Amino acid sequence: MTKIPDNGKMSKNALIIFTREPVPGKTKTRLMPYLSPQQCADLHLCFLRDIYREAYKTGADIIVSYDGEEPVLLKSVFGNGCRYIRQQGDGLGTRMALAIGFALDLGYEKAVLIGTDIPEIRAGSLADAFKILDEDDLVIGPTEDGGYYLIGMKKLYNEAFSVRKYGGSSVLNETLQGLKDCGISAGLADAYQDMDEREDLAGYRRRMIHDIRLRNSHTGIFLRDNAAVSIIIPVYNEASTIRRMISQMEPYKDDAEILFVDGGSTDGTAGIIEEVFPVLTGTKGRAAQMNRGAAESTGDILLFLHCDSILPPDITGEVRRCMAGHEYGCFGVRFPSRNLFMFTNRVISNHRAWMRGLPFGDQGIFISRELFFDMGGFPEIPIMEDYEFGRKLKAAGIRPGRTEKRITTSARRYGKGTLSILRTEFSMWKLRKMYRNGMPAEEVSRRYRDIR
């Protein structure tokens, strides 16, 4: 933790961090039940750590204006070099006014107050807010939802806190209009996104894909490690293989949402799954089944698996780490065969996924919830749905990330022996070529040999 130097000198500027003690069940409650009470408190601590890192860079004296009990957790973030004052008064506006008034009464020339729902704040924005006060009576930092995260002044203007109701989309405009009516000049600082709702966190995840600073922040690491994963597994007549997948899924019961989607199996597959997991039923067809699972899911990340795959350890961790820097991705693939041509197939499959940006379903495709639905889900065609979905993403300029570990995918469709493998590989290559050349998916499907 960074310490503020105690050199006995008082800065001209006071930066007031307006917050509450991050106690589970009393902070970030609008994110429940998406996050647990403890997760909400942990996320709030991450916000505070990221904000303090930037606040410290400004050189302003930091005052923590807190609501709640003794600020034990706040002191673990800000240390003993800050001044702590308990919030006083009824109503948000009154409490902010009293906090700013307290700072100005201490002798500071400028006092800027910020909330703690803006973990993306930069020190430069805070420094600019103090500079704005060289020209204007007051400075306000807008949020994209119509409110504000920052307000500062050189003398206390109670007129700035006369808003009828805080929390709505008109707070900023109402505040600015009130100041204008009173002849008080106000400059605007940089705008930021409040982190109040699940959708706000999803937006942060999207932004951190392209911003390494956000990925490496306390907030970014929390969102990476706590992203909700939904695992969607389409099944049809897999009684002979399904128990292995069930066994592989059991360790993830508490870490992911697991959705098996049966396409009308006639061999008892659904009954076997229901001994351990609930089963969704849907129209037969891998694309339709996966879309049904996605529609019923709640996760931030959707992971689609084939039920005959052998998974590496910590699949959810692999997916979360990859998705910190990508909108979608896949695992590398290997086959349980020492045959030279299966090794060649592995190399070609991984090259196609990573270099050409076209992963297949047996590589465990995963994707952000928002992107999946924005792209319309898998095209409900009888075959090539994964290939077509990949082509659509590629055309949109979105390329897959890749995990460090690989999935072992079944080689059962290739048969046994080199001749069978070569025949199957040639057949699959030919079918893909026919599809690219315009053959309808229905005709491709008719020529495809279903091994079940």
Image: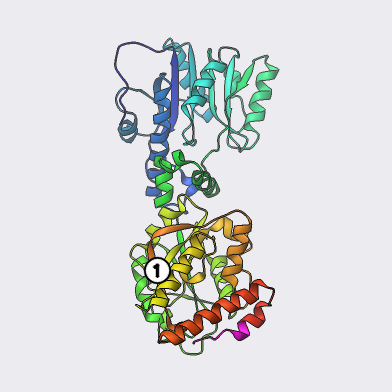
Q: Image quadrant for the N terminus? A: top left
Judge whether 401 appears above or below 203 on screen.
Answer: below
Left or right: residue 266 compared with residue 64: right
Residue 41 showing in the rendered view: yes
For disc 1, the marked residue is: 407
Q: Nearer the viewer, residue 155 or 298?
A: 298
Tally of numbered tags = 1
Residue 86 showing in the rendered view: no
Question: Which span of residues is magenta-colored?
Answer: 445-451
Judge whether 417 appears above or below 64 on screen.
Answer: below
Q: Nearer the viewer, residue 54 or 35?
A: 54
Q: Nearer the viewer, residue 445 or 297?
A: 445
**Badge 1, how many Cα within 10 Å: few under 14, some, many 20+?**
many
Judge whether 123 appears above or below 313 on screen.
Answer: above
Image coordinates for residue 119, horizontal then vertical, percent: 46, 36
* Residue at figure coordinates x 43%, y 70% from the top left: 346
The colour style of the image is rainbow
Q: Amino acid at mark 1?
A: Ile
Magenta-colored stretch includes residue 449: yes
* Residue at figure coordinates x 53%, y 44% from the top left: 207
Which secondary structure lies at badge 1?
strand
Image coordinates for residue 23, horizontal then vertical, percent: 37, 41
Image coordinates for residue 435, horizontal then vertical, percent: 64, 75
Left or right: residue 226 compared with residue 444: left
Magenta-colored stretch includes residue 116: no
Residue most toward the bottom? 267
Left or right: residue 436 compared with residue 247: right
Judge whether 203 appears above or below 374 on screen.
Answer: above
Image coordinates for residue 254, horizontal then vertical, percent: 37, 63
